Image (spheres, rainbow, N blue to C red):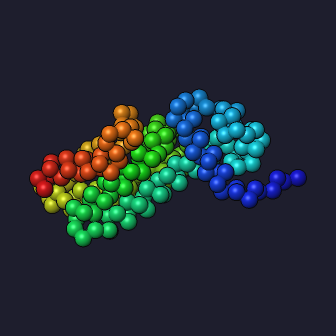
Amino acid sequence: MARTQAENYPEIRKEILRRSAALFAARGYPNATIADLAAANGMSRGLLYHYFASKEAILSEMLHEHLDMMLAELRDAAQDGDSLEARFRGAVARMCVINAGSQDLQVVLLHDLQNLGDEDRAAIVAKQRAILAVIGGLVGDLDAGRTPPAARPAQTMMLIGMINYTYVWYDPAGPVGPEAYAGMVAETFLAGLGR
């Protein structure tokens, strides 16, 4: 007999994704077993399977949800502001704040993407490219043709690197909060463009 869904089914799934991201970030996806995931979520393996069909399904959903949210936020930021610089600062701020609040997901995205099947991995990479297109569009508009087009991807990735790899050293609860750090990133990058 099929198990009925709990009233708070969506909330439980979200909590499973959060705790599983922490486990994957700490141990690495290949080293985390279903038993480990069940223990991290305070439930039996059978109950975990009620919420997700597999370990890979957990990885897939956490990455898709994270990137869908980030892409929507960045698209909004890229349109929200009375000047190009304001839109750029807004996009950098949103990305920094999102990353500061999801450091485990950043680790998983950067280190465990290869553990998804080809089709799923390609869909995630397409979302990453869409995010890069939003940021790259802002960078290109700010640069106003000073950088050769062939160097534009490197220029964009330089900015992304200042944001995405903070999980290695940055403490969002430390003396420089996410908004302040975003301001530092934007100022540094804009100064490099002579703006």
Q: Quadrant of residue 16?
A: top right
Percent coordinates x, y for residue 187 in the rendering:
20, 50
The residue lying furthest to the right in this view is 1
Inspect this view and state whether residue 156 appears: no
Residue drawn at x 54%, y 38% is 22
Inspect this view and state whether residue 105 appears: yes
Query: Quarter of the image containing the C terminus?
Result: bottom left
Q: Quadrant of residue 20?
A: top right
Q: Is residue 43 left or right of residue 174?
A: right
Does residue 152 sit above or below 32 in this rendering? below
The residue lying furthest to the front in this view is 175
Residue drawn at x 59%, y 41% is 19
Q: Is residue 103 left or right of residue 3?
A: left
Percent coordinates x, y for residue 127 in the rendering:
44, 55
Residue drawn at x 77%, y 57% is 5
Q: Is residue 37 left or right of residue 127?
A: right
Q: Is residue 48 left or right of residue 185?
A: right
Percent coordinates x, y for residue 109 in the rendering:
47, 42
Q: Quadrant of residue 87?
A: bottom left
Does residue 46 sit above or below 69 in this rendering? above
Percent coordinates x, y for residue 151 in the rendering:
20, 48
Closest to the observer, 188 or 61: 188
Residue drawn at x 67%, y 40% is 41
Q: How many marks?
A: 0
